[in-house]
């Protein structure tokens, strides 16, 4: 019991000395660098990679041409049949089925480029 009382007394006296030594506003000043560091880390690990990914997707959609095989974000597979404008395209799903979709819903593009093999 005496040990607990001594520890409590030392803690209270240390807290009182620490409070007296603190300058007004110094709590926020010591917190500001940590907040800045936190936002920098969040930017480089979360925001910047998403921006890069979005730019790559925009380039992929802009380079879309007739004959490219696509997969939409909903999982529909098809071939680009006609490009109406930069926002809408017509895809051929089956021999008789076609669908108009928004280009923003395209998830993946496989181009039909013939690759030469070396013999």
Image: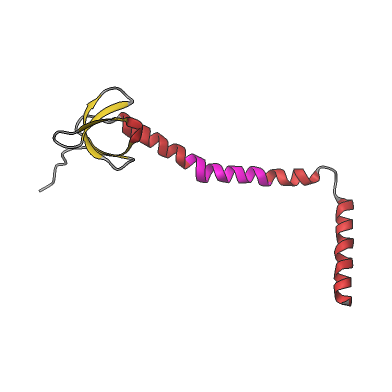
Name the dominant secondary structure of the magenta segment: helix
Asked which quadrant contains residue 25, the reply is top right
Where residue 109 appears, as percent x and y from the top left, is 27, 38
Asked which quadrant contains residue 79, the reply is top left
Q: Is residue 67 above or below residue 34?
A: above
Q: Is residue 41 magenta?
A: yes
Where residue 47 appears, as percent x and y from the top left, is 51, 40
Q: Is residue 27 magenta?
A: no
Please name the residue shown 51% across and 46% down the image.
Answer: 45
Left or right of 60 on screen, residue 43: right
Asked which quadrant contains residue 18, the reply is bottom right
For the record, the magenta segment spans: 34-48
The answer to which of 11 and 102 lies nearer the viewer is 102
Please name the residue shown 36% across and 36% down the image.
Answer: 57
Q: Is residue 10 above or below residue 59?
A: below
Please name the residue shown 54% across and 41% down the image.
Answer: 43
Colour treatment of the image: secondary structure
Name the residue furthest front: 97
Q: Where's the N terminus, which quadrant? A: bottom right
Where residue 116 appears, as percent x and y from the top left, is 14, 42
Q: Is residue 65 above or below residue 38?
A: above
Left or right of 43 on screen, residue 66: left
Name the residue furthest top: 85
Left or right of 56 on screen, residue 49: right
Where residue 118 appears, as percent x and y from the top left, is 13, 46
Left or right of 36 on screen, residue 52: left
């Amino acid at each position: 019991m005496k040990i607990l009382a001594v520890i409590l007394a030392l803690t209270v006296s240390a807290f009182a000395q620490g409070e007296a030594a603190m300058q007004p506003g110094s709590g926020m000043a010591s917190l500001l660098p940590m907040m800045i560091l936190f936002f920098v880390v969040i930017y480089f690990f979360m925001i910047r990679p998403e921006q890069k990914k979005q730019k790559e997707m925009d380039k992929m959609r802009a380079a879309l041409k007739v004959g490219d095989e696509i997969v939409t974000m909903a999982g529909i597979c098809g071939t680009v049949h006609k490009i109406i404008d930069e926002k809408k395209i017509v895809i051929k799903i089956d021999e008789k089925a076609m669908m108009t979709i928004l280009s923003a819903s395209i998830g993946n593009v496989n181009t039909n480029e013939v690759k030469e093999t070396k013999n």
